[in-house]
Each structure stands twice: as C-alpha cells, then as structure tokens.
Image (cartoon, grey):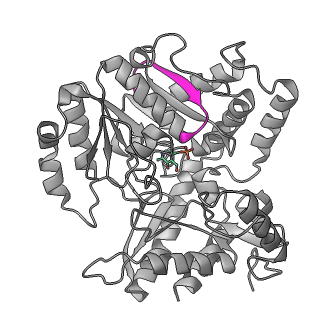
Amino acid sequence: MPKFIHLKTSVPGPRSLALLERRKNQIPLGIFNSSPVFVDRAEGALVYDVDGNTFIDFAGGIGTMNVGHCNPAVVEAAGAQLRKLTHSCFSVAMYESYLTLAEKLNQITPGNFPKKTMFANSGAEGVENAVKIARHFTKRPGVVAFEHAFHGRTLLTMTMTSKVKPYKFGFGPFAPEVYRLPYPYEYRCNVDQMTDSLEDFFNSHAAAENVACVVFELVVGEGGFVVAPPKYVKKLESICKKHGILLVIDEVQTGFGRTGKMFACEHYGLQPDLIVMAKSLAGGLPLSAVTGRSEVMDSPQIGGVGGTYTGNPVSCAAALAAVEFMEREQLPKRALEIGETVKEKFVQFALKHPFIGEVRGLGAMMAMEFVKDRQTKEPDKERTNEIIRKCYENGLLVLAAGTYGNVLRTLMPLVITEAQLAEGLEVIEYALQ
Ligand code: PLP
C-alpha cells in the first residue's frame, strides 16, 4: 500500500482532461508537456493535482525545486518582499536584496579572485549575457558550444543548443560565430582520442584568437546527464588559459547542491571565468545570475546589460532565503545520499533489464540510458516515453532527457524524505517491469 501516492482517479483525471481540452484550443501545441496533469498545489517533494491525486515529484520543475515546493522560508521571504516592494527596476531605483544576493553568490561560487554578479530572468538570458560579456571583454566574436548541450531557446542560446528537433528545426537562420565541439560522452565516444585531439579544433574549426568563450556543462542536463571526465575538463581549461579564451560554465541545471556540491565546478577544482546559474537559485521564482571575474564582468559599458525585470526584488528575496536554506540544511550532502540510493537501485534495475544501457550521474543527478541492444547501443526513445507514461500513471512525475530522447533522469527536490524516495523508486521499478 503506497504511503504518499494517492490516486483517486486514473491519470489524467476528469478535471485535468477538461483543462487539457481548454489548453488544446488556447495554448500553442509547440509548448511541450511531459505529463497531462494539471497541478493544484505542491509541497516538499509532493505534487497534488486538480483531481485530488498525489504524486511524488522526481522532476522538480526541471531541477528548479532543490529546496522543495513551497519551501516555507522561501514563501515567507517572497511574501514579505511582495508586500514591501514588488518592482522598482534595479536600473531606476536600487534595492538591497539585489546587492546582498550578489555578495552571496560572489562569496559562494568557485574562484579565488574578486567577482561580480548580475541578474537576469531565465537560464537562457543568463547564458546570453555571459556570452555578451565574454565578447565585450575579449573583443572576439567566436563562441564554442558542445554536442548534446542545452543552453536555452532564445536565438543565440538556441543556436548554441545542440539537439535539432524540437529545439532548432524550422527556427533558422541561426546566430553566427557559434562553433561546436563533440561532448566527451564516454558511453558513446572515445574520450581519450577526443582529449588528445582537442587542440586541433582551434586549427580546423575556429581560430583560437577569434574565440571569446567556451560554454560548457559539466553534466549535460537536457542532453542526458552525461558527466564530463575530469581529464577532458583539465585539458579544456588549459587550452582556454593558453589562448585567452574565457571558460563559461553553465551551472543552470547542475547548480545549488544538485550534484553533491554547491556547484559542479567544485568536483573538478575548476575556477571558471564566468558561471551561469538559474533554476534552483530562487526556489521556483524566475531568476538567473552571471557571476565572474570582476574585470570581465565590468567590461560592458553602462546600460549594455540589464533589463526591466532582471533581478526582481521578490526573486532576489526568495533566492537569498533559498541559498540560506541550502546551506543550513546541507542540501549538497543530502544530494549525495539521494544519489547513492538512486544509483544503487538503478544498478539493480540494470542487472535485470538488458535495455538499460548505462546508469550514470553525479550526486542526485542520476540517469538511466535505454537502448534497444547493449551491443549496438541503439537508443530506445519509444520505451523511454512508455516508462515515463507508466510512471505518471502510477503517481510519479519524472522526465526524459538526451539528444536521442532515451534517458530517464532524476531531479527530485532535495528535501525528499527517504520513504518518498523509496516509493518513487518502486514506481520506476514497476514501470520498467
Ligand atoms: N542551461 C542549461 C544547462 C539548462 O538546463 C537550461 C534549461 O533547462 C537552460 C540553460 C535554459 O534555461 P531556461 O529554460 O530557464 O531559459
């Protein structure tokens, strides 16, 4: 008898179905929904739908809810801020929460050098700003992105994103001066060869002296939770240093405890020039940040970066509460424990099911890659979708990922209890069966 999952109706229930019908007529098809569920409310790692069904959440609003749904500290801070000052625009009249949060991020992000922080609204906007700043500082146009990368849906970040369908198909022409390197995907590539030949790229594809920045995910998020091997990252870092190319680490999905450290960079001893953050930063409110070397961040002229809503006071207040909560509750440590439990289960599943090609991840960013055959490694997207469907029909929200759509990934709130985690994993086990 499940403790947390209570399904009063089949999923989707009648109220979700009625709303789906309205959605069909009013909201464009191009907006993807991974489940047909309409949510009423959520708390911690549980989501309650409009039909009175309770789900365990392994999706966390796509990795946004590390501190848990409706985290009381976040709700309290955001509520208090809402009643005091909703918006003045930092460029019109400044407020302290923007400054305090900048101080906090300058302090907790990796890098033993003076740093500055600016805010934007979404992950994509954060990445766009990092590229603008890098170009301005280096006076170079080139941007190097990777296969399997996801950096957003704006014109520049869509260009930097790798997966063609659905993210790029029909949306060209793309932004110029974006070059692409293969990602060190150990399951599918020869990483040693890739590491050895890395420098060649700057002869054969893009002249190093024309490249402003390399933008890299240490664990590709949307691309399928592929973890970059340390030796590759070391080489990349040294090539960037040698050629004056800025290293921008996109921590939008990996940040704020998810990988078992506050930032994935810490696993690699990496001190990037710029770090982009979003998602779990503000406990569910829209906010992104670019933090980096002061001299780099100070490069753009006054008015060259910013925006009407960027660093909104409510989001900043929520973020301060969220980051304090992560520190107080040692969420990175909890992510390691969660990751261990999930990994152990996934490895057991892989012993039983030959369609699980690989189990991988870092901290609580764990994943299974599904293949039609372990020899050929042919991706099995259909089976992946079927498993995701079986999961939500049985009370677990979980997401697919990967360029081939054949990865199941876990992004549960890090406040999930042991019992909730165990029950969610039972649903996955049942779905695999
Ligand atoms: N960068 C990474 C690594 C992401 O995972 C995402 C979103 O999933 C983005 C950037 C874009 O963030 P947003 O959807 O907030 O624009």
**Compared to 227, does 360 lie above or below?**
below
Residue 117 on the magenta segment:
yes
Residue 21 on the magenta segment:
no
Q: What residue is drawn where x is 74% and y is 76%?
A: 12
Task: Name the foreground residue: 401 vs 172.
Answer: 172
**Compared to 323, does 391 lie above or below?**
below
Residue 185: tell me if it is visible: yes
Range drawn in magenta: 111-123
Task: Name the foreground residue: 100 vs 337.
Answer: 100
Is 110 on the left-hand or right-hand side of 229?
right
**Compared to 206, does 415 lie above or below?**
below
Is 373 on the left-hand or right-hand side of 277?
left
Q: At which x and y percent is residue 76?
A: 82, 39
Q: What residue is drawn where x is 41% and y is 14%?
A: 299
Q: At which x and y percent is residue 94?
A: 70, 14
Q: What residue is drawn where x is 39% and y is 56%?
A: 163
Residue 242: tell me if it is visible: no
Q: At which x and y percent is residue 245?
A: 26, 28
Task: Name the foreground residue: 177 vs 277.
Answer: 177
Q: Indicate the quadrant containing the N terminus: top left, top right, bottom left or bottom right.
A: bottom right
Is 139 on the left-hand or right-hand side of 349?
left
